[in-house]
Image (cartoon, rainbow, N blue to C red):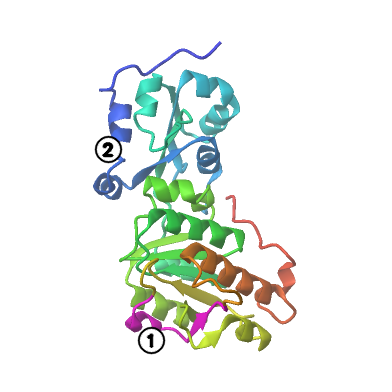
Amino acid sequence: MPPAVELTSPRSPRILAARRLTRRTARARERRFLAEGPQAVREAAAARLGRTDGPVLLDLLATPDAAERHAELLDLARAGGSRVAVADPDLVEGLSQTVTPQGLIGVCSFLDRPLEAVLADRPRLVAVLAHVRDPGNAGTVLRCADAAGADAVILTDASVDPYNPKAVRASAGSLFHVPLVVGVPVAEAVRALADSGARCLAADGAGDHDLDAELDTGAMGGPTAWIFGNEAWGLPGEVRSLADAVVRVPIHGRAESLNLATAAAVCLYSSARAQRAPGGCRADEGNRADPPDAG
């Protein structure tokens, strides 16, 4: 039997607080965002990323049906210190940003960290999103970075909000895995990465360095930061000039170009392979990066 409904009023403080987070201004003010569906909620409930100030998942709202189907998730959330409530389906679905709501909405605290804190961990593979405006692309690049074993993702001040519901969905849980920096100017980020010892590479279809040639010369085995630009117009000249090299992904067929997420996946995996090859900066790690500290 489905559990009893605890929240029935649209004026419930918890419902009103969650509804505010559909707006970017409220998210920024309260440093909270919504994560929807069982996968995102599971990752949020398990997330720590070195935190010592309480759970990432602060509040979980579930329809009676979802609470019954995902009872273990509700137990996981409670065990981690999250508040859990069963709410009227219309209230939960009213918070959904998807065509087919899944009956679970998590209220999460922001995950981003200061740039200097991330660089203190000496990252060896970083994705920098400069002027990336599409939330789906931002979330997908974050997912690619996670899969490639990147140590951090930086979204510059001209990029989209990574806590946008579409970006959260597109990250497929990776938002809760990879250290994140938000809102720094691109020049500041690139200078800091260079000072930390990273080689900064701008990904651009018109680059004068070929990715295959970079791999063949063994130049990509060290700490690397990839800079990815806007979906439509790429990287402006002033950003390309900040990089140590502007690198193009070779097009061997007749396609005009690659989209942002595909190019990012190719670049990040190329670095991941080079870094794990003999002589690379991760050669002692084998085929898989160490998991994040579960603290």
Most foreground residue, 209 or 12: 209
Can residue 52 be seen by looking at this rendering? Answer: no
Farthest-out residue, top: 1
Q: Where does the N terminus fall, quadrant-wise?
A: top right
Q: Residue at x 31, y 40 (%)?
A: 21
Measured in 3D between alpha carbons, the distance from the residue under mark 1 to the one under mark 2, in whole angstroms, is: 40 Å
Q: Is residue 99 above or below residue 245?
A: above
Q: Dot 1: what SS?
A: loop
Q: Is residue 247 above or below residue 109?
A: below
Q: Is residue 290 above or below residue 18?
A: below
Taking the magenta stretch, the answer to whether it contains residue 200 is no
Q: Position of residue 125 (x, y in %)?
A: 56, 71
Q: Is 159 displayed left or right of 292 in the figure?
A: left
Q: Residue at x 39, y 19 (%)?
A: 88
Which residues fall within the magenta stretch? Answer: 235-250
Label 2, residues with CA under 10 Å away: few <14, some 14-19, many ≥20:
some
Q: Position of residue 46 (x, y in %)?
A: 56, 42
Q: Which mark is residue 241?
A: 1
User: How many numbered markers are drawn?
Assistant: 2
Can residue 130 be seen by looking at this rendering? Answer: yes
Q: Is 45 displayed left or right of 13 in the figure?
A: right
Q: Is residue 153 above or below residue 277?
A: above
Which amino acid type corresponds to the residue marked 1 in the rendered image? Ser
For the residues labelled 1 and 2, say whether their Cβ atoms are less than 8 Å apart: no
Reading the image, the residue beneath label 2 is 20
Which amino acid type corresponds to the residue marked 2 in the rendered image? Arg
Q: Position of residue 104 (x, y in %)?
A: 47, 30
Q: Residue at x 46, y 28 (%)?
A: 103
Farthest-out residue, front: 254
Q: Position of residue 89 (x, y in %)?
A: 40, 21
Q: Residue at x 72, y 68 (%)?
A: 285
